[in-house]
Image (spheres, rainbow, N blue to C red):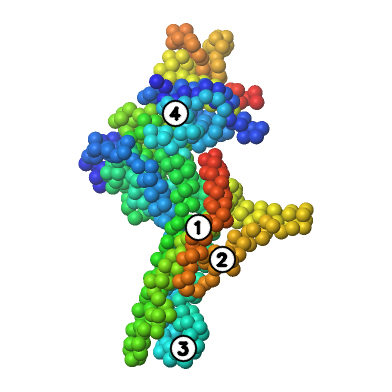
């Protein structure tokens, strides 16, 4: 069964179309990266999935309608919007008390063990913590919930590099421990690409690309073309061309390694490069 | 931090020493610890209970404000006790009505003061209740937990309608009891009997009256106002106080200009102040015990029930708004 099943998902704010008919299926055990520029509709899509916003079209998450059954759904779904959503007045111990009080799948001992490894004291108020520590606290809560689906919306926004890396490392560790399903939206592609199993590019409310990482690796090739082979390479219909350190780098779709080997050094493109090729390329013609 | 090396489980070690507050990568020894077994047996009242506690954590003024008022009042009262025995002697010379008034006056005064502060705290609380969470974005955290919007709104409505009146009642009773006790000691020290004091301020009866005033009257009778304020606080993108006050003023003005009547203003005025002059139970701020009859009358009065229906309508609307509103 697909954990998330969206068909013709649409959302408008007045004349602005935030989601323009999205079809998406996320199976159990996938880590899906939702990648797009600002205003592409990532947050709107995630808000719809966790029942924070009404929408048009069909959306089913873990067998439930998120808009009408948010409170039930949230027993199985964890959501981190961004780092700044814990109320500033709450103490770490109160946050744990509250979640333990309302959440049937919260393991308080686990959260406390997590916090014991940080410098956060139980009596610390959120307003006294640094941004990174607030994220640790939120992560401690979320990691101690035995959820089936984890939804993250720019969870590391505004954090420095170390906290960002540690955030995703913790997440990854937990993923292999329990094999959860994760949907993470970000425009900082490079920091999540190594944990993803699937990638979705969203642009102006539409899905412009949805591939598993295996498909990305087997379907896309990036070639550092020898200057004298450039004309030949261009006849093979590259989907994108860019310049780096005096060399032309061409991105090809659906061509195999043998066809390209003679043109130059062949490698698998990073998700960032693919994103620039697929989304940025369209952007040029805006 | 120190446990991290023993934990030895993951790849976040880099940068640990620099930061001193790393995100731990794993749960170490707690892995596989028993999950919460309350899974299916969670009572629907549990989220409500914890949500009310949550409100008390966030808004400590709910109990701090009445306690502070009581403390300030007691300080003044104790200072006044220096000349208390003289005043009791003087009171003894007065006629029965004036004597009653003179003796019970500070007890009535503190009760009114505490009611007033409860009202102020209630209004301030309601205006921020569904607005503050959106302004500081914490609504995204609260909504990520399995607590329904109905539970959230009910927990917030219960503060001015139930919790504040109960707190006010308890603080009032405790303050009055301390006043009576200390006064009695002062009188005894001056070699006078405290009997007159306890007859004019019968503690138990005063407390029952107070319960009716504060809990029944202030809570239930004013419920529609609190419901309206919560609705304004769920609606407003800014300045909930303006959203709460301008629409009623506008309705009053339009009615005045269009029909040259003021039924709406009169209804509001009756709801706010009028019942004190009418037959409703809290008709006068004395501590007379002749209020039980009107209590029955109050509970069967259409005004009370219409008010509760209006409250329900406001709270339903506030719930719907809270459900679709995000951070501002």
Q: Position of residue A181 (x, y in %)?
A: 38, 28
Q: Position of residue A105 (x, y in %)?
A: 33, 38
Residue B223 lies left or right of residue A174; in this view the side is: right
Q: Position of residue A213 (x, y in %)?
A: 42, 20
The vertical placement of A10 against B225, above or below, is above
Find the distance from the CA under tag 2 to the CA under tag 1.
12 Å
Q: Which residue is mark 3?
A: B91
Residue at figure coordinates x 64%, y 58% from the top left: B267
Q: Is residue B295 visible?
A: yes
In this orientation, which residue lies closer to the viewer: B310 or B76?
Answer: B310
Instruction: Answer yes or no: are tags 3 and 2 on the same subunit.
Output: yes
Q: Is residue B328 visible?
A: no
Write down the chain letter for disc 3.
B
Find the distance from the CA under tag 4 to the CA under tag 3.
73 Å
Q: Mark 4–mark 2 contact, CB under 8 Å?
A: no
Q: Which residue is mark 2?
A: B279
Q: Position of residue A71 (x, y in %)?
A: 43, 37
In this orientation, which residue lies closer to the viewer: B159 or B58?
Answer: B159
Residue at figure coordinates x 62%, y 34% from the top left: A13
Find the distance from the CA under tag 3 to the CA under tag 2.
31 Å
The vertical placement of A253 against A63, above or below, is above
Q: Nearer the viewer, mark 1 or mark 4?
A: 1
Helix, strand or loop at label 1? It is helix
Q: Which residue is mark 4?
A: A64
In this orientation, which residue lies closer to the viewer: A260 or A127?
Answer: A127
Write down the chain letter for disc 2.
B
């Amino acid at each position: 069964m697909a954990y998330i099943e969206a068909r013709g998902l649409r959302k408008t704010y007045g004349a602005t179309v935030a989601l323009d008919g999205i079809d998406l299926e996320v199976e159990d055990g996938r880590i899906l990266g939702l990648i797009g520029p600002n205003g592409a509709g990532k947050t709107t899509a995630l808000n719809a999935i966790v029942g924070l916003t009404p929408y048009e079209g069909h959306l089913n998450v873990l067998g439930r309608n998120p808009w009408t059954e948010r409170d039930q759904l949230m027993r199985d779904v964890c959501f981190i919007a961004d780092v700044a959503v814990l109320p500033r007045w709450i103490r770490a111990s109160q946050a744990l008390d509250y979640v333990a009080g309302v959440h049937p799948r919260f393991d308080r001992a686990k959260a406390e063990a997590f916090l014991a490894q940080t410098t956060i004291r139980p009596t610390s108020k959120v307003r006294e913590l640094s941004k990174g520590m607030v994220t640790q606290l939120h992560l401690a809560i979320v990691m101690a919930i035995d959820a089936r689906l984890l939804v993250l919306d720019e969870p590391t926004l505004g954090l420095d590099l170390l906290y960002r890396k540690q955030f995703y490392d913790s997440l990854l560790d937990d993923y292999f421990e329990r094999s959860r399903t994760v949907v993470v939206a970000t425009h900082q592609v490079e920091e999540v690409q190594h944990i993803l199993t699937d990638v979705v590019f969203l642009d102006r409310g539409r899905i412009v690309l949805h591939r598993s990482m295996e498909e990305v690796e087997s379907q896309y090739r990036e070639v550092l073309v020898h200057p004298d082979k450039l004309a030949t390479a261009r006849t093979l219909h590259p989907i994108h061309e860019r310049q780096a350190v005096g060399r032309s780098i061409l991105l090809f779709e659906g061509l195999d390694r043998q066809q390209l080997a003679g043109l130059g050094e062949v490698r698998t493109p990073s998700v960032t490069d693919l994103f620039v090729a697929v989304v940025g390329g369209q952007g040029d013609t805006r | 931090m120190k446990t991290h090396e023993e934990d030895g489980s993951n790849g976040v070690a880099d940068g640990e020493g620099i930061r001193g507050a790393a995100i731990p990568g794993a749960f170490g020894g707690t892995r596989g610890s028993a999950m919460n077994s309350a899974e299916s047996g969670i009572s629907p009242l549990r989220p409500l209970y914890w949500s009310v506690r949550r409100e008390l954590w966030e808004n400590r003024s709910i109990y701090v404000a009445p306690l502070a008022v009581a403390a300030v009042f007691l300080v003044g009262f104790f200072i006044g006790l220096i000349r208390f025995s003289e005043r009791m002697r003087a009171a003894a010379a007065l006629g029965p009505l004036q004597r009653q008034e003179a003796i019970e006056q500070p007890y009535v005064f503190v009760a009114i003061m505490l009611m007033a502060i409860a009202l102020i705290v209630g209004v301030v609380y309601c205006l921020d209740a569904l607005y503050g969470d959106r302004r500081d974005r914490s609504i995204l955290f609260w909504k990520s937990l399995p607590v329904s919007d109905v539970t959230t709104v009910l927990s917030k409505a219960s503060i001015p309608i139930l919790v504040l009146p109960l707190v006010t009642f308890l603080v009032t009773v405790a303050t009055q009891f301390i006043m009576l006790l200390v006064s009695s000691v002062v009188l005894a020290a001056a070699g006078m009997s405290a009997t007159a004091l306890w007859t004019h301020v019968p503690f138990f009866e005063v407390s029952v009256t107070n319960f009716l005033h504060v809990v029944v009257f202030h809570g239930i009778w004013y419920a529609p106002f609190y419901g309206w304020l919560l609705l304004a606080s769920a609606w407003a993108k800014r300045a909930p106080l303006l959203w709460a006050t301008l629409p009623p003023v506008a309705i009053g003005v339009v009615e005045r200009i269009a029909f040259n009547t003021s039924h709406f203003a009169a209804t509001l005025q009756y709801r706010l102040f009028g019942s004190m002059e009418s037959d409703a139970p809290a008709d006068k701020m004395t501590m007379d015990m002749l209020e039980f009859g009107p209590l029955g009358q109050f509970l069967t009065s259409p005004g009370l029930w219409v008010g509760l229906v209006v409250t329900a309508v406001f709270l339903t609307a506030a719930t719907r708004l809270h459900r679709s509103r995000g951070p501002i």
